[in-house]
Structure formats: C-alpha cells, structure tokens
Image (cartoon, grey):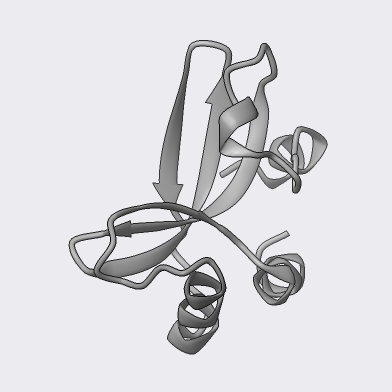
Amino acid sequence: MDVEKVKSQLDWNLRFEDEFKGGRGYTFVIDVSFNKAMLSLYRFTPYGSKSEVLEQQPPEEMMNKALQEQGANEKQDGFYYIDKTLRKWLEDNIL
C-alpha cells in the first residue's frame, strides 16, 4: 500500500450509494466474509471497486462494536462502515 497516495485520495465519508458517481479514491471498510471481519482498504473508481485486507488488524472487539452499531455481525457478509474508534486506530497505526 502506498500510504502517501492513499492519504492524498482518502475519503473518510464515502457512502456506498455514492461510489460510482464519478469519483475515485480510497476509504477504509470492514469487510466481512466467511464469518470473519477484517479491516480493508477500499479503492473505488467510476467503473468498479476493490478491497484489500490490511496486514495489521485492530482488536477484534473494536470491529465487533462498529458492526453492532450498524445492526450487523460477523455472520453477515458484506462491507460495513468504520466508526470513529477505528478511524483513530487507522490514523495511529497505519497512516
């Protein structure tokens, strides 16, 4: 991951319903699949998107709290938004 490139194109406020409206850049999401929540870098363009699981992960309880706030859990596959606690963790540990 090119941290400087990500930082220059980072959209902390991306809403999934807006991702294909011409913008491009990065955001961070909780990617749940196979009953496992992983923090991922989410790249979006006008034509598609791709998520890449981060090598370094936050504590599991932080992820579960963010999922619960959205009415989700590790058993529901999908992409979910990060919360302020996860954003702070990213700023302190990844960016």
Looking at the rendered structure, the number of numbered marks drawn on it comes to 0
Q: Would you identify the image quadrant in which residue 34 lies?
A: bottom left
**Closer to us: 86 or 77:** 77
Q: Position of residue 87 (x, y in %)?
A: 71, 66
Q: Residue at x 65, y 15 (%)?
A: 21
The extreme front residue here reads: 71
Q: Quadrant of the C terminus?
A: bottom right
**Closer to us: 68 or 59:** 68
Q: Would you identify the image quadrant in which residue 72 lies?
A: bottom left
Q: Position of residue 18 (x, y in %)?
A: 64, 27
Q: Residue at x 43, y 33 (%)?
A: 50
The extreme left residue here reads: 34
Q: Residue at x 53, y 41 (%)?
A: 42
- Up-down relation of residue 37 to residue 64 (above or below): above
**Closer to us: 42 or 17:** 17
Q: Quadrant of the N terminus?
A: top right
Q: Horizontal placement of 55 versus 24: left or right?
A: left
Q: Horizontal placement of 8 versus 30: left or right?
A: right
- Up-down relation of residue 85 to residue 79 (above or below): below
Q: Position of residue 23 (x, y in %)?
A: 69, 18
Q: Residue at x 77, y 43 (%)?
A: 7
**Closer to us: 86 or 57:** 86
Q: Position of residue 24 (x, y in %)?
A: 66, 21
